[in-house]
Structure formats: C-alpha cells, structure tokens
Image (tube, helix red, strand yellow):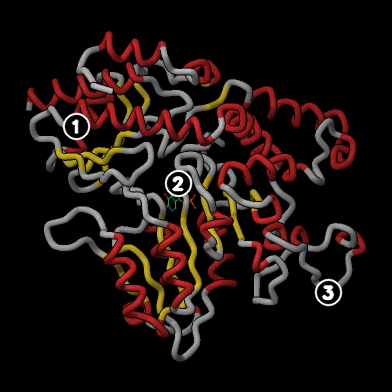
Amino acid sequence: MKLVNDEGFARALDDADELRAFRDEFLFPKGVDVYLAGNSLGLQPRRVREYVNQELDDWAALGVEGHFHARHPWLPYHELLTDQTARLVGALPSEVVVMNTLTVNLHLMLVSFYRPTPKRFRVLMEASAFPSDQYAVQSQVRWHGRDPSDAIIELSPRAGEDVLRDEDILAAIAREGEALALVMLGNVNYLSGQKFDMKAITRAAHAVGASCGFDLAHGAGNLRLSLHDDGPDFAVWCNYKYLNAGPGGLGGVFVHERHASTDRPRFSGWWGHDKATRFKMGREFVPLPGAEGWQLSNPPILQLAALRASMELFDRATIAKLREKGAALTGFCEFLVRGIRGVTVITPAARGSQLSLRVGPRAKALSAALKDRGVICDSREPDIVRAAPAPLYNSYVDVFRFARVLGELMEAT
Ligand SMILES: *Cc1c(COP(=O)(O)O)cnc(C)c1O
C-alpha cells in the first residue's frame, strides 16, 4: 500500500482496522493525547477493576474458604492463565506458568540452566542487554565462583552499526564452542527494538552443547512467538509491558517440554510440589512436571486477576492479528518519521512494535517536550527516543500525531 503523510489517510486506516474496537477496552491517562509507552507500562484494561474487586469481595465474604469456594477458587487460580499464555507464546500448556517477577524468574532459570563446569562456563549475551539481566547473570557467575570478565561474552554491533547481525551472533556461538554453557539474549532488544532469529540462535547454541534462554520482556504480547517449535530451553518475561498486567505485575516462564521431568537442580518451594500431595506436608520435594514445578509460593491473586483481564483481550484479538496490525502501525510510523530532519531510525526491519529513534543529545529534553504536548513515549541515554505503537489500543492517528509533534519539535530546536 502506498502510504501518505496525512491525517485523513491515517483516519481511513483506522476505519478499516478490524481491531479498532479494542481501544475502548482501555483507560487512557487524563491529558494524554497519544500513548506510545506500552513497551514500558501497558495501559489499564477497563475490566481490571471488576476482576480485582471480585477477588476482594470473595476474600471479604469467604476468608480462607476462598481458596476453595471463591467464584474462581484461589488454589488453582494461576491455571486460569495457562492456556491463554501458552497460545500467546506458542507453547504447550505444560511449558508455561505465570509466577513471581521477571528478574526473579531469570535467576530461577539460571539456577537450573547455567551449570558451569571447568571447561564449559561461558555465557553469551548482548552488551546492550537490559541492566537487570546483566546483574542477574553477573551475580550467578560470581555465585559459581567465577569472574564475569572471563565468563561473560558480550555481543556488540560492528563499528559504525547500530544493531547486531544475526550471522555475528551465530559466529560467536560457534567460536565459543565447547566453552559455552549458555546463550542468553533478549528478544526483542529493549534499546534498539531489534528482533533476533530465535530458531537459528537456539539451533546454533544446541549444536555446540550450550543451553539457550531468552528474555521476552519486549517480545511477549508483541511478537508472534513459537517457543515450543523454536526450542529454547527456557524463556522469561514480564506481563506489565505489552501485556498490561499493571505496575510490578507478575512474570511469565517457559520451560521446554524436554525438561518437564528434569533432575537438574532447582530452587524449590511448596507451590512447585506435586498438587496431589502438596497438603500432606511431606518433607521430600516432589516437583510438578513442567514449568509449574519451578513455582515457589502461592501466588498473589489480585495480580493474577488484573492480568486475566488483559489476557482475555489478547485471546479475543489473537496475537496473529495483533502482530499484523503492529507491523503496519510501526511501518506507518517509520514512514512518517523518516521525513523528519535530525531523526534516524535505528530499529531494523526485524522488529516488533517499537521504533528506536536516534535524535541526538537532546533525547531526554525531547521526550519531556513531547509529554508537554500530550505525547507519551520515553528516552534512553544518551540519544534515543523509543516509541511503541501497541496494536491493542493504538491507532494510525496516534502514530500520525506523534510524528507531527516530533517533527514540529525537531524543527523548533
Ligand atoms: C523491563 C525489563 C526488565 C525488568 O525486570 P523486572 O524484574 O520486571 O523489574 C528486565 N529485563 C528486561 C529485558 C526488561 O525489558
């Protein structure tokens, strides 16, 4: 389709958008004209309040009996999210669980899947990984008595380039070979918006005998994922970015079926214990098969309730259609901002619904000025503005207005 830089054109695209009604399922902050920060914190679905209130009412009315007699009994409550989560990330239901938060889950996975030996101890990750992922991996490396500067191999783009080349990732895996214990990448990268070829990377990692895991903080609810078929050993993500679970919302975990009954070490808690005998309170831990076996505690029901409201919307819209719209929205955004002097799009074509724009040293001031004009996106040091058109609630007119205001501000400075 030939794109046109015109609000009427954007409006026509919205009129033709079969997902446009989902926008009405969300609450938009007061005074905000355009919200493009769903990669940081997704908006609140209207029905969150009802779903959370249901549990507050049941708690008030039933006390401890709510575990069994709430309208949605709390004991198996997390299972209400299992099928939807599995569909969302392309996994078997037994391969996923909603629990804890992202960095906690990353640690739990590293405990099981980073098992260094004297010969095989290295971890391959991105130099521009999200800091929490770096802290987690560094601390695990130290906890195994190793030096991060020796054990962690960081991937950087080639000189003069902004994003990693897939072939360079694969070459680094081959080069580390038998020294490589784990490949641990984001997908997509939070800073550049780059999506990696999960299947090829997983295959390359396994070919040298390494484990492979992905941080899908910016992938879950954004990309169309096929975790089971692509075959990484584990993946972790948060549900509060594209998935709208609310600030500090629960995380998600994928453990591939091949590890369903693993005897790898893990940190254990009673909620990972066999359901049939959990309340016999025996001394010996018998893990549930699959991802649920990594659960520690009985989960926060109010957080799960909030997440349900959003996951139902994803299920209705389907991730396939959302990805299609996300690609179109992001493509329209790219088309518009490419016409603005002083703005460089660093996000490559392999991406989800995020554009990272290099705007020079005034990135922070620029995102503040955008906010003053009712446009919410964010900046990352030193020179990047990130804009994420979320296909569940963003429109083509949103993208048009963002680009128009950005253009005006770039002209003015
Ligand atoms: C958002 C994000 C985090 C945040 O971690 P929490 O444990 O949820 O606070 C970690 N890693 C990546 C890649 C992220 O994008």
Q: Which residue is mark 3?
A: 284
For image coordinates 45% across by 40% down, the residue present is 222
Earlier residue among tags 1 and 3:
3
Q: Secondary structure at mark 2?
A: loop
Q: Please name whichever residue, 233 or 284, is drawn nearer the observer in this view of the structure.
A: 233
Q: CA distance from mark 3 to mark 2?
A: 37 Å
Q: Which residue is mark 1?
A: 366
Residue 298, compared with residue 146, is above or below; it is: above
Outermost residue on the right side: it is: 280
Q: Is residue 9 left or right of residue 142?
A: left
Instruction: Decide if residue 229 is in sight here.
Output: yes
Which quadrant is the N terminus positioned in?
Answer: top left
**Residue 197 picture location, percent across and down:** 39, 56
Q: Which residue is mark 2?
A: 219
Which of the two marks, 3 or 2, is nearer to us in this view?
2
Residue 164, compared with residue 241, is above or below; it is: below
Count of marks, rendered view: 3
Q: Residues within 10 Å of mark 3 (few under 14, many from 20)?
A: few
Which of the two marks, 1 or 2, is nearer to us in this view?
2
Q: Residues within 10 Å of mark 2 (few under 14, many from 20)?
A: many
Q: Please name whichever residue, 117 or 299, is drawn nearer the observer in this view of the structure.
A: 117
Q: Are marks 3 and 2 in contact (CB under 8 Å)?
A: no
Instruction: Decide if residue 142 is in sight here.
Output: no
Q: Secondary structure at mark 3?
A: loop
Q: Which mark is residue 244?
A: none
**Residue 412 picture location, percent across and down:** 8, 23
Which quadrant is the C terminus positioned in?
Answer: top left
Q: Secondary structure at mark 1?
A: helix
For the residue marked with disc 2, what is the amino acid?
Answer: Gly
